[in-house]
């Protein structure tokens, strides 16, 4: 985080004033409010039954709007907002950095993390990931980090992966989410965490007729590049595995880093996907392999399809797949042009309310919509664990499912989370219903004609339909708003509604 002298003086003054007023657990939120990162005085409330297009964009390209985000994005315009998000280096994200910098293990070299207990590392990784998703203004970047963390999935409870994943997150995923796909694949292929997870460190030439370890080579072709129907054969897997021999983990002072050992490499001639890799290539064999796989037409289609599943629909429209794949081919695998094509497409605009939020997205969107103050402690993380979506805890290489069906069994835990959050019964997350109601111009629920309609419109980007309105009003008539619990119950009901479950 880069602070100006004025920022430093303001933070110092706020911290000094806050000592007698607030505890350590919510000092960060207090500072954020004082620096203008809290809930604004007024927030946008849609007046149409059609989903507001800006609300839809922020809900799909990120984790849903923070209070005040809609107004800013509407003023900027859709294209300008997308361009800003595609250049995260220009976005001031100091308050998010301020929240997340406390996790010491995240910024250390991999070798130093071996001094930490595994449970500390697991929580630091999860809390860091969750807080960046909640508070970062680089919302598209965070969404893409989640996408590629699944695409190049690493299960932190296998071997030493838990000590290595934070470096993989920073130098493989975050560094390359808006770059060239080749660079992302190559960085992943040589990542110490991936070498452990898919046994690349065990892949070496053994004798004249030794069989290489094919685990990573198979996933490289099946999941990371061409896709299961991409046209590769078992012979291609075998030849790719030969290209990948010789990579190992260092020991001693270099613990946690990877290196190439020529003595363990199969340096003979290889043929992958019909292309010859000449003998004697040594360390450069992996570069040639990644180039061949990334330039294959099936890779363009596979990546396009998965991105469209993430942003548009579980059933990707073929017309959009072809256009996005064409962008990949025309730009040598650049990711930004693919995202522009998706986010500005008619298919994207027409898809509002059609995707069930995965548990991680649901929890984050709840925290963002309510302007919550949290440091993502156990009471929040436990809900993600119960829903089977703790960060970096999916055991198989295909990553957490994008599609809705596998997550339908999590609805009860979602409802429990929503009501716990809105009643402020989560020990490590707090919301201000007073501030939200003030921003929504709701002074007295008992005197509002249809208070639930206004809340529903704010949280869902549209007015309720006839059936939703009737159900809400019937529920409201049963509540006694002289009791503060009734207000919290209504907020929880809307956050757990079918409309908010989707984006």
Image (spheres, rainbow, N blue to C red):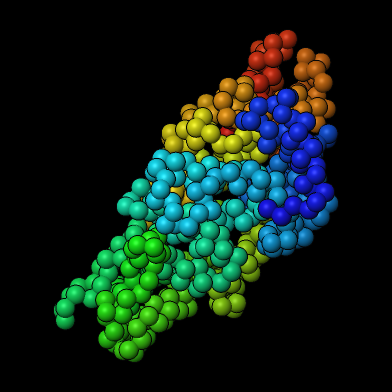
Say which of 46 and 238 sits in front.
Answer: 238
Say which of 428 and 146 sits in front.
Answer: 428
> x, y (%) of residue 215?
29, 64
Relative to residue 286, is residue 37 drawn left or right? right
Write the residue at 39% across / 63% down: 253
> x, y (%) of residue 417?
54, 29
Is 314 above or below relative to 453?
below
Write the residue at 53% across / 42% down: 127
Is 105 above or below relative to 370?
below
Write the residue at 52% across / 26% down: 416
Dividing the picture into quadrants, the one containing residue 264 is: bottom left
Name the image quarter holding the C terminus. top right
Relative to residue 423, is residue 406 drawn left or right? left
Relative to residue 313, is residue 453 drawn left or right? right
Write the residue at 38% across / 54% down: 161
- In the image as oriented, which residue stretches furthest toward the front? 253
Can residue 466 be seen from the camera position used here? no
Can residue 28 be seen from the camera position used here? yes
Is 475 above or below relative to 74?
above
Image mark count: 0
Say which of 328 and 17 sits in front.
Answer: 17
> x, y (%) of residue 452?
72, 25
Say which of 449 and 68 sits in front.
Answer: 68
Relative to residue 425, is residue 214 drawn left or right? left
Is 499 above or below relative to 87?
above
> x, y (%) of residue 287?
43, 79
Dividing the picture into quadrants, the one containing residue 426 is: top right
């Amino acid at each position: 985080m880069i602070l100006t002298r004025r920022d430093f003086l303001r933070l110092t003054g706020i911290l000094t004033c806050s000592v007698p007023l607030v505890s350590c657990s919510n000092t960060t939120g207090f500072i954020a409010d004082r620096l203008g990162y809290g809930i604004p005085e007024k927030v946008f409330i849609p007046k149409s039954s059609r989903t507001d297009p800006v609300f839809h964009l922020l809900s799909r390209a990120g984790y849903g709007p923070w209070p005040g985000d809609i107004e800013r994005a509407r003023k900027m315009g859709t294209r300008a907002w997308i361009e800003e998000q595609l250049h995260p280096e220009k976005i001031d994200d100091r308050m998010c950095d301020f929240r997340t910098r406390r996790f010491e293990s995240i910024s250390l070299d991999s070798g130093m993390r071996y001094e930490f207990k595994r449970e500390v590392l697991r929580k630091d990784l999860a809390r860091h990931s969750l807080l960046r998703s909640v508070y970062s203004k680089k919302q598209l970047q965070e969404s893409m980090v989640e996408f590629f963390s699944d695409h190049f999935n690493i299960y932190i409870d296998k071997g030493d992966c838990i000590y290595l994943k934070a470096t993989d997150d920073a130098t493989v995923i975050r560094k390359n989410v808006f770059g060239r796909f080749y660079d992302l694949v190559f960085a992943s292929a040589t990542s110490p965490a991936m070498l452990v997870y898919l046994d690349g460190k065990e892949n070496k030439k053994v004798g004249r007729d030794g069989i290489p370890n094919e685990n990573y080579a198979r996933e490289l072709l099946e999941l990371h590049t061409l896709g299961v129907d991409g046209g590769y054969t078992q012979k291609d897997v075998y030849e790719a595995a030969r290209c990948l021999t010789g990579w190992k983990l260092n020991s001693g002072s270099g613990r946690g880093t990877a290196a190439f050992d020529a003595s363990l490499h199969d340096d003979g001639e290889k043929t992958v996907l019909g292309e010859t890799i000449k003998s004697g290539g040594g360390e450069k064999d992996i570069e040639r392999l990644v180039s061949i796989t990334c330039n294959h037409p099936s890779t363009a289609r596979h990546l396009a399809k998965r991105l469209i599943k993430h942003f548009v629909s579980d059933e990707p429209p073929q017309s959009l797949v072809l256009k996005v794949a064409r962008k990949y081919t025309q730009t040598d695998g650049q990711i930004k042009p693919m995202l522009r094509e998706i986010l500005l497409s008619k298919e994207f605009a027409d898809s509002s309310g059609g995707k069930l939020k995965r548990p991680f997205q649901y929890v984050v969107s709840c925290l963002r919509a309510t302007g919550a103050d949290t440091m993502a402690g156990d009471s929040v993380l436990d809900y993600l664990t119960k829903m089977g979506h703790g960060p970096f805890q999916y055991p198989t290489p295909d990553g957490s499912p994008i599609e809705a069906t596998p997550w339908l069994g999590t609805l009860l835990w979602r409802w429990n989370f929503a009501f716990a959050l809105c009643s402020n019964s989560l020990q490590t997350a707090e919301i201000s219903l007073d501030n939200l109601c003030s921003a929504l111009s709701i002074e007295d629920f008992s005197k509002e004609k249809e208070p639930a309609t206004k809340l529903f419109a704010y949280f869902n980007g549209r007015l309720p339909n006839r059936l939703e309105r009737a159900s809400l009003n019937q529920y409201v008539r049963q509540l006694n708003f002289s009791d503060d619990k009734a207000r919290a119950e209504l907020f929880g009901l809307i956050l757990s509604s079918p409309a908010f479950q989707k984006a």
